[in-house]
Image: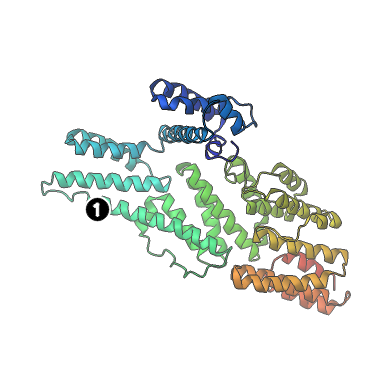
Amino acid sequence: MEGTYLMALLNTLKPSERAAFQYFIDYESEVAPVRYSQPMTLLRLLLDAPAGHVPAKADIQRALFPDAAPGRLEKVMVDAAKILRRFLLRQGEMAGDGQTREQLDWLQILHQRGLDNWRQQTLTRLTRRQRERPAGKPEDSRDRFETEYAIFLQETNHNHLRSDLNVPNTLAALDEYYHLMRLSLLNQYLLQQKVTRLDLPLARPEEDVPEQYLRASPLLLISYKINQLLSQDPPPLEDFRTLAELLRTHEATLDPAVLKDFYSYLRSTCALLINAGEDDLLDFYHQLQVESLERGYLYYEGDKIPHSAFLAITTAALRCGKHDWALQFIEAHKGRVLGENVHFDLYRLNLACYHFAKRDYQTALDLIVPTYEFLDYTLPGKRLELKILYEMGSDLLSYKAGAFKIFVARASRKFMPAALRKANGDFVNLLLQIIRSPRRDPARGARLCRRILARPQAAERDWLLEKAARLK
């Protein structure tokens, strides 16, 4: 059963949802067609299994259909997955996600049946509730447009030639939804462009959002501020601080899922600023990550974090001198990274970063693997290897540095964005200059320090400065 669609769905259920699903099955058993009795029996068997134990398909087959053909179980599993799907959809409606959608559908039914008086009462209540509170997520803005459009249809059907037919309100709601969805897509694209090479032409930044919409919708205003930040390289520091303050101010009005996305943009922007030389933000960045962990903003699929967040949190903590906290974080998230077959290597690199910070160079070197599935692990892994070889005085350093320089040049032509190429290219070029410098050459050391300071975007800049300073 492991790896099937049905088990994948079941494994996402929280304990409270599993209990509710049990009640759902008991109720459905009384009203469902006979053909669903076996799928429900299968679901009960799976739900009653001990935690962590997944019965084998052969055992289920023997328990339910001892005399049936082997293919029978597959059909029952499909029906069982349909039952679970129906339960999850109903749970979403009961949680309120589908309440407005349900009322909008109901308005259409009332109209089709000629019950426009009742339709008007329902529409009035729905409109009042929507206009009293700002949109907390994009779906709210879409529902508001559809509600205003329903009013337009109602006014058109009863046109007494004395009103605006609700056209201004409908157009305003449509504009707000359009700008919001465009910003949502464009912001994701702009962020993606900073971590991978995209040959597609960049869509224009959003510049023409009417001021009245920004004043009326915190959701739209914050999305717009994010767009302005990501459209500039590097993002302006003052605009970043404004975004952070906006998020604090409007947290209570925003949907939790939207807050999760907005804080992801805030962390990403902070990282971009630090990479551009704003090292004073390091402590703020680390605290922002800690708060995001505590609030659950960094977790997906239950208790898993993205691979990029794993390394970013570790390195920020280590740069702030929070060595003990970093080790606790690494160990607590071992095996809790999104994706398959990647956990152990990613854990090892995070642990290697910790041991490097503690100056345990051989242990750190032994933990590094030659390559990783993700570029944002391969590059730090190769840079860490070079730093370790330098600290250990290894004869392999010049050879490895040359190989890394070739790797960066080739990768930049295929999939590495310009900013990433420059950061890593500057790192290896400056490192090679340090390697080739006499150990005690104050003039040379001073020149190298000035070159490093003139390249704030260079990867591992603090470490390079430390090594160049020792030449003085």
Give above or below for 8 relative to 184: above
Label 1 SS: helix
Give above or below for 217 relative to 434: above
Which residue does the image show at 18% across and 34% down from the upper left? 115
Estimate how packed mark 1 is, as few (under 14), some (14 to 19) or many (20 or more) residues with alpha carbons within 10 Å. Answer: few
Residue 449 shown left or right of residue 218 in the figure: right
Quickly name the residue at label 1: 168
Give above or below for 433 relative to 308: below
Q: Quadrant of residue 280?
A: bottom right
Q: Nearer the viewer, residue 123 or 456?
A: 123
Q: Where residue 270 appears, x then y in whole percent?
A: 60, 58
Regarding residue 251, the answer to whether it shows in the image is no
Q: Amino acid at mark 1?
A: Pro
Which residue does the image show at 68% across and 53% down from the upper left? 311
Q: Nearer the viewer, residue 37 or 354?
A: 37
Extreme residue in the top direction? 30
Which residue does the image show at 54% across and 61% down from the upper left? 192
Q: Nearer the viewer, residue 436 or 26?
A: 26
In what quadrant of the picture does the C terminus appear? bottom right
In what quadrant of the picture does the N terminus appear? top right
Q: Quadrant of residue 425?
A: bottom right
Q: Where residue 337 appears, x then y in whole percent?
A: 65, 47
Residue 229 shown left or right of residue 332 in the figure: left
Q: Where residue 139 appears, x then y in whole percent?
A: 39, 46
User: What is the tally of numbered marks visible in this picture?
Assistant: 1
Q: Where residue 395 appears, x then y in whole percent?
A: 87, 70
Colouring scheme, one of rainbow, by chain, secondary structure, one colour: rainbow
Residue 41 shown left or right of residue 220 in the figure: right
Regarding residue 281, the answer to whether it shows in the image is yes
